[in-house]
Image: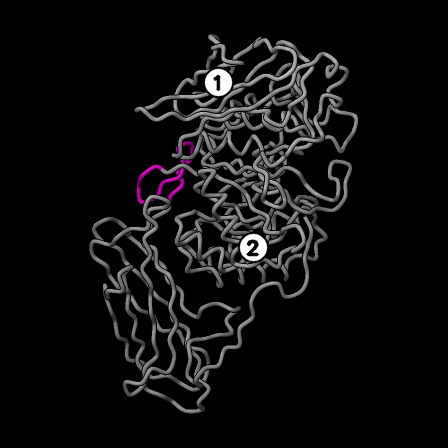
Amino acid sequence: MPVYGGIYRPVSLIVTDPINIAVNDFASAGIFISQKNVSKKSADIHLKVKVDNKSAQTNNIEIFTSIIDHNNKTVKSISTPYTLSPQGRQEIIQDIKVNNPHLWNGLEDPYLNKVVTQIKQNNQVLDEVTQPLGIRKFELKANEGFFLNDKKYPLYGVTRHQDRWGKGSALSNEDHDEDLAIIKEIGATSIRLAHYQQSDYFYSKCDSLGLIVWAEIPFVNQVTTLEENNAMQQLKELIRQNYNHPSIYTWGLHNEVYSPNNYTIELTTKLNDLAKTEDSDRYTVQVSGYNVVDHPVNNNADIQGINHYFGWYNGEVENLTDKEDVETWANEISKKFKDYKIIFSEYGAEAKPEDQVEVAGNYGNQWSDPAFFPEEFATKFHIVHWATIEKHPIFLGSYVWNTFDFATPITRLNVNPRNFKGLVSFDRKIKKDPFYWYKANWSKEPVVYLTQRRMVNRGNEFTTVTIFSNQGTPTLTVNGKKIENVKNGYNKIHFVAENVQLQKGENIIIAETNLNGKTISDKIIWNYDSKYKTSQKEATTKDIHVGL
């Protein structure tokens, strides 16, 4: 993960009256909104307003707060008179009961109110701050799932690194909007923002779009035993600056940090205590890179995240030998840890659209060239992993690593230097085959999609055709001839036709469905010649239009 320096977000100069809502409280809004007892009938809204007085004298003021709905109509108001001392920052508490609230309900109805808080003196407004208010209830139940407003709600998750080719992290709002549009298209309901605080604009857009957010600090990978002061400050900044975003459900304490174990356990516990002191209403999460739930460092937060890449770094995608695969592991932890809150926080495989093979193996690093990352293997990896995750309620949520390719230091497995585990290319122009696997599984949009569209030049006369369809069993034709043996594969969205015969030269493959009189179809073209069979890599096409 690269660390980009410098100022790469907008900077504001804030000028206030001597009596003001605090502006230097770790860059927070100075107002902290929490909510209790949320239901369709009512919700208790609690406000803590931090006020500074630099006037050098006692002042009688009024804290006036209004909850204003989406139509700019005042829902409820409260006025609190207060005698403001010139010494010390002071906190004013306000409690508002909202009857019959319009709930913030994720993607279906991300309804936002706003809270407008004013400092008034002699009917003159001295300061005013506006913050979002999405009235909602989050709950995680072990071995059951995530619940939003007391209804089970899937955490179809993707992770996001924010950097871009040619820009690093210096992104425009349009860049953020494009990322969010892609994430919405795939059908994700949740985003893990890894592994650092991201733009307030992005959190705000998640509020308004209904995407549920995991926010975390950059305590990642290595422990020097010098992290405590910095980690504690970063977590305090993360929480205070983002406290009022209704989309955030959990605070991330660390990602893949271990030895020395005793130090890491102690610091994780302190971070957890700090998070609960700052915000008692949200969950905390820590993440392990081992597929061992009861690793000595684990379980010092509310949620245990597990990052693992079966068939990429170790193990196998499917259990064909004696190595552990994702299905075996999921079955094991489902029996042993049913009372634990567990999230599959990272899984993925590298895929370069220009690297193609006809048949995927069972282990991603089987190719001798470490820079060769065939798209077909990543497709198989994601098919098997998601088909396993969706049938194991031990996983309260899961997060694909990563939505987009991202920059990374050079390693044996990363070239250019870049990590190619994204479902979408670094420049956001190419959506790889696994992208459409998740779109077909998660999105409400109709999807019929043929894989291996970039594996154009093929050396096998008899081959398997793979289709993703959320519209039922597709009709498959090859050169106008209907293929009869289309059947379900790993789940109800995955369809395969095996031993499909290709003719020499061009082959036109079409998959289509007709649901309620509407035809959804996809088409690809493959060129067959036995000369392409000399090796997997020589079967790769290098001159195709990879934007297909």
State the quadrant of the C terminus.
top right
Q: Residue at x 52, y 38 (%)?
A: 399
Q: Residue at x 62, y 59 (%)?
A: 170
Magenta region, main secondary structure:
strand
Q: Residue at x 67, y 18 (%)?
A: 458
Q: Is residue 211 left or right of residue 111?
A: right
Q: Is residue 3 left or right of residue 448?
A: right
Q: Is residue 70 visible?
A: yes
Query: Mark 1 or mark 2, which is nearer to you?
Result: 1
Q: Which residue is identified by label 1?
A: 495
At mark 2, the secondary structure is: helix
Give x and y (percent) for residue 189.
Answer: 43, 41
Give x and y (percent) for residue 483.
Answer: 49, 10
Q: Is residue 391 visible?
A: no
Q: Which residue is identified by label 2?
A: 270
Give x and y (percent) for residue 537.
Answer: 74, 23
Crowd rating for badge 2 (residues with CA inside 10 Å; few <14, some 14–19, many 20+): some
Residue type of the residue flagged with mark 2? Lys
Give x and y (percent) for residue 142.
Answer: 42, 35
Tell me where the magenta segment starts and ends, as one range. Answer: 139-152
Q: Earlier in the sequence, mark 1 or mark 2?
A: 2
